[in-house]
Every structure is written in structure tokens, then in C-alpha cells.
């Protein structure tokens, strides 16, 4: 669905202002709605941006590396609480777990030793591991959030050992090809925007190197386009089950660590960053490599996202990410999701489901239980049926939302088989407030 003209005007104005004040040779941001690119806001002409122009993803690559790890977890080849040593033997930081590395909660230092890896031709995995010492762990695990590029180089190495497949090939086979992301590549592929440093005093451009980062590639190597990154944003909002189970992606979006303990506006899940903006939480990641910055922000409940790139450091990763979240908030506020119309059910629910519907009481408070067409139950205080339960056998239901997620609801029957009470994790609901549990 295209954006309304007034929304487009406001988005385009903010992008034009950001390109001008940030002195970006080119700036491109795309708005994604319901799985499709709804609008491209572009500014600058060095080169002129379009949806098929490649920029460097930088650390947004980490969200894809994390997805590869979760695929292997779901396949039973690893557990998140496995120590790194189990899958990448011989490293002096091997006591750290895969979960801690994914969520930047292991205390591992940010960079490998040696020259700045983002601007230097990379070495192989053996050299990366050989350069490690126990001193690379700056803090005990879970004491503090500490972002680590090195962690993702090691996770990529673990993936190669587990699968026997190089990270780049695994990425192409397991994510890029299935999702149709054919313009997301390991090396720059024309057409692509050159990356620059803008001189602070006379606005000239210095082109930056485009390195092969070797064993550190899982932390930030990939190149992509607005169109392809929009596909990835759509996947993070509503994943293709053949690539990753939806419940696994939801697990990735749960916080492992809060990244700013003063304001609680940010955190990190299993490979994705979390941003709290007002009453909403966005998931995504920022990215930067020499000469490039990138942004990804997704509001999963509405399946709306903003993706973006610039080909200089002028906007910096945090500034471009802030712009992406500003635009996402603007779109969500200006164009809320349409209300789903109510429609009558085709037929009454089955008898064993129907007898559970209606009003129930617990601790002097009245609750309602309603059936849905999928054979589930919705429950909550009267007028607020926000808790969903699905059947797990006769008289046994499993909570799927909210505070009752994972809990068991059991139907209690009298001697003639009538449902007389509902036992929800030892909290017993009765048909009247006068009945004893």
C-alpha cells in the first residue's frame, strides 16, 4: 500500500534535510509495509540513489549471521548455552557461550588485535583465533553490555566448523537465495555507491577502500540494496518459515541485555538491536564500514520498517539509525494500521469448546472466555480477552500470549462430565463467585 501524499512529503523533507546537514554524497531510505517497498526517499547525486544501488551493510550483516546460528540451533546441531569451545576448539575465550556472544553479554572486547579490521584485508580463521588471549574478555559475562565485532567473527567460525561450509556460501544458500536477495553479495557488485570521507574544511571526497575482511566477514562484510534490505526487513517482521520458524525469530527479539541502564531505551536480543520509542519497540540494527553507514528499523506488530544507507560517515551510524526510527514513527503515527472488520463465524464452535465460553470468576473478579475460528480460546477480564490458549488434548490448553504464555489451563469436570471449573496454573475459575474452587 503506497504512503499518503502528505506522509511522502514529510518523509522526503526529512531525508533531504539530513542529506544536506550531514553532507552525504548520497542518501537513500526506504519505507516497507506489509512485505513490500512502499516508498523510496532519496537525496544527493554522488551517485543518485535508487532501489538497486548497492551500499555496504556493515553490522546489519550480524542479524543474518545470528539467523544462521538460530537455524543450526533449531536443527539440533547446537544449543545457545553451549560454550564456544565446543564448536570452535582451541580459543582462550572458549568458556563464553553462544548466547552471550550473540547478545554482546559475554564481556568480550570489541575488536580483534592488529590493524583496524574494517579497513584492512582480513586474515583467515586460524589467524583470528591465534591472536586471541584471555585478556580479550574485559568483563565477566552479563555484568555489562559490551558490543563486540570480534564475537561475530568467532560465531562465523563456529558456523563453519559445525556445517563444514564457508560462511559466505552458507549465507547465500540458507538466507539470500531463499529470500530472493540476489543483490546482496559478499563483494561490491555494480552498480554500487563508492564510499567516502568528506573533508571537514573544503567538502572534497576521499574514497575509502573496499576490503575483504576475511574471518571477520560475519561481523560486517555484506553489500546490499534498498530493495534487498527491504526484503530482509519484511522477513524480520514476518519470517518465511522455510528459512526460520516464526517463534525462533520472536525469541531472537527478546532482550538478552539492556544497553543503556540509565534510560532503558535500548537493548540487544540474539543478534538484533532493540529500540524503545515511546510506547513502541522496534527491532533492527545499525551498520557502518569505512565510507558507509546503514540502518534497519522494524515494527513487527504492524509489519512496517524503514531501511537506509549513506555513502559517507557524515551521518554516522547512530544518526542514520535515529533518522530511520524517526521516519518509522512518523509513518506509524500518520498512517495507523486499518481496523480489521468484524465478520460473523461460519458456524458455532464444537461442543467441547463452546461449553468453556462465557463468564467465569476468580477472586471476586469476572472474566470472559471466547472461542475463535481456529479452535482456540481467548480469555481476560470482561471486555479484555487478550490471553490466547490452544488445545493440547482433551481438557488441556496451553497459554500462548501475555503472562500466561506457556502455562497450562485444565478443565475440571463434575461426576456427570460437565465443565465446572478451569484450573489455570493452580488459579481456579468458577462459574459463579459463590462457588468454592
Image: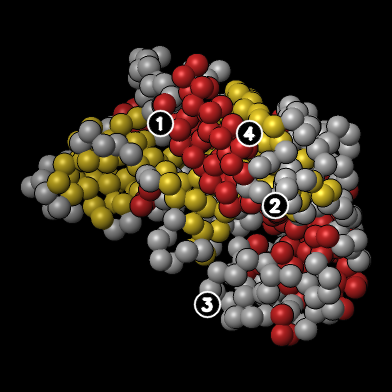
- Residue, far front: 202
State which quadrant residue 426 falls in: bottom left
Q: Which residue is mark 4?
A: 29
**Label disc, if present, on residue 143 of the rendered structure:** 3
- Camera-nearest label, 1 or 4: 4
What secondary structure is found at the residue carrying circle 4? Answer: strand
Tell me which residue sits at (75%, 58%) in the image: 219
What secondary structure is found at the residue carrying circle 2? Answer: loop
Tell me which residue sits at (49%, 57%) in the image: 266
Whichever of callouts 1 and 2 sits on the residue coming sooner in the sequence is 2
* Mark 2, other Cα within 10 Å: few <14 / some 14–19 / many ≥20: few
State which quadrant residue 335 falls in: top left
- Camera-nearest label, 1 or 2: 2
Of residues 116 and 164, which is closer to you in this image? 116
- Camera-nearest label, 2 or 3: 2
Tell me which residue sits at (89%, 34%) in the image: 190
* Mark 4, other Cα within 10 Å: few <14 / some 14–19 / many ≥20: many
Residues marked 4 and 2 touching at CB (< 8 Å):
no
Asked whether, in this view, residue 383 is left or right of residue 96, the answer is left
**Label disc, if present, on residue 333 of the rendered structure:** 1
Q: How many marks?
A: 4
- Camera-nearest label, 3 or 1: 1
What secondary structure is found at the residue carrying circle 3? Answer: loop
Q: Which residue is mark 2?
A: 201
Amino acid at each position: 500500500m503506497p504512503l499518503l501524499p502528505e506522509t511522502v512529503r514529510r518523509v522526503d523533507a526529512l531525508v533531504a534535510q539530513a542529506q544536506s546537514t550531514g553532507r552525504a554524497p548520497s542518501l537513500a531510505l526506504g519505507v516497507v509495509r506489509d512485505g513490500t517497498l512502499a516508498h523510496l526517499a532519496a537525496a544527493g547525486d554522488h551517485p543518485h540513489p535508487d532501489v538497486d544501488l548497492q551500499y555496504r551493510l556493515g553490522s546489519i550483516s550480524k542479524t543474518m549471521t545470528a539467523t544462521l546460528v538460530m537455524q543450526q540451533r533449531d536443527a539440533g546441531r547446537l544449543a545457545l548455552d553451549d560454550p564456544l569451545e565446543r564448536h570452535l576448539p582451541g580459543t582462550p575465550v572458549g568458556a563464553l557461550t553462544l548466547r552471550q556472544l550473540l547478545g554482546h553479554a559475554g564481556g568480550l572486547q570489541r575488536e580483534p588485535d592488529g590493524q583496524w579490521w574494517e579497513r584492512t584485508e582480513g586474515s583467515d580463521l586460524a589467524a583470528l583465533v591465534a591472536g586471541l588471549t584471555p585478556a580479550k574478555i574485559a568483563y565477566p559475562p552479563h555484568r555489562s553490555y559490551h558490543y563486540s565485532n570480534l564475537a561475530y567473527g568467532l560465531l562465523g567460525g563456529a558456523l563453519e566448523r559445525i556445517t563444514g561450509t564457508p560462511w559466505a556460501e552458507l549465507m547465500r544458500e540458507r538466507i539470500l537465495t531463499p529470500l530472493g536477495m540476489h543483490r546482496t553479495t559478499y563483494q561490491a557488485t555494480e552498480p554500487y555507491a563508492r564510499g567516502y570521507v568528506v573533508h571537514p574544511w573544503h567538502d572534497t571526497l576521499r574514497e575509502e577502500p573496499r576490503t575483504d575482511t576475511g574471518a571477520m566477514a560475519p561481523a560486517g562484510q555484506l553489500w546490499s540494496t534498498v530493495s534487498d534490505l527491504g526484503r530482509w526487513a519484511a522477513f524480520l517482521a514476518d519470517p518465511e518459515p522455510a528459512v526460520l520458524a516464526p517463534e525462533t525469530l520472536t525469541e531472537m527479539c527478546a532482550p538478552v541485555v539492556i544497553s543503556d541502564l540509565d534510560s532503558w531505551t535500548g537493548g540487544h536480543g540474539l543478534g538484533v538491536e532493540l529500540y524503545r520509542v515511546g510506547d513502541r519497540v522496534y527491532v533492527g540494527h545499525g551498520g557502518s564500514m569505512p565510507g558507509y553507514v546503514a540502518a534497519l528499523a522494524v515494527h513487527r506488530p504492524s509489519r512496517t520498517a524503514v531501511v537506509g544507507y549513506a555513502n559517507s560517515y557524515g551521518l554516522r551510524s547512530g544518526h542514520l539509525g535515529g533518522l530511520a526510527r524517526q521516519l518509522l514513527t512518523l509513518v506509524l503515527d500518520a498512517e495507523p494500521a486499518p481496523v480489521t472488520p468484524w465478520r460473523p463465524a461460519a458456524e458455532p464452535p464444537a461442543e467441547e469448546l463452546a461449553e468453556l465460553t462465557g463468564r467465569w470468576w476468580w477472586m471476586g473478579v469476572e472474566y470472559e472466555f471466547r472461542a475463535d475460528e481456529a479452535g482456540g480460546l481467548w480469555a481476560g477480564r470482561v471486555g479484555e480477552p487478550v490471553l490466547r490458549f490452544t488445545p493440547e488434548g482433551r481438557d488441556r490448553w496451553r497459554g500462548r500470549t501475555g503472562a500466561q504464555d506457556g502455562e497450562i489451563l485444565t478443565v475440571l469436570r463434575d461426576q456427570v462430565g460437565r465443565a465446572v471449573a478451569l484450573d489455570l496454573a493452580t488459579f481456579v475459575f468458577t462459574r459463579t463467585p459463590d462457588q468454592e474452587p
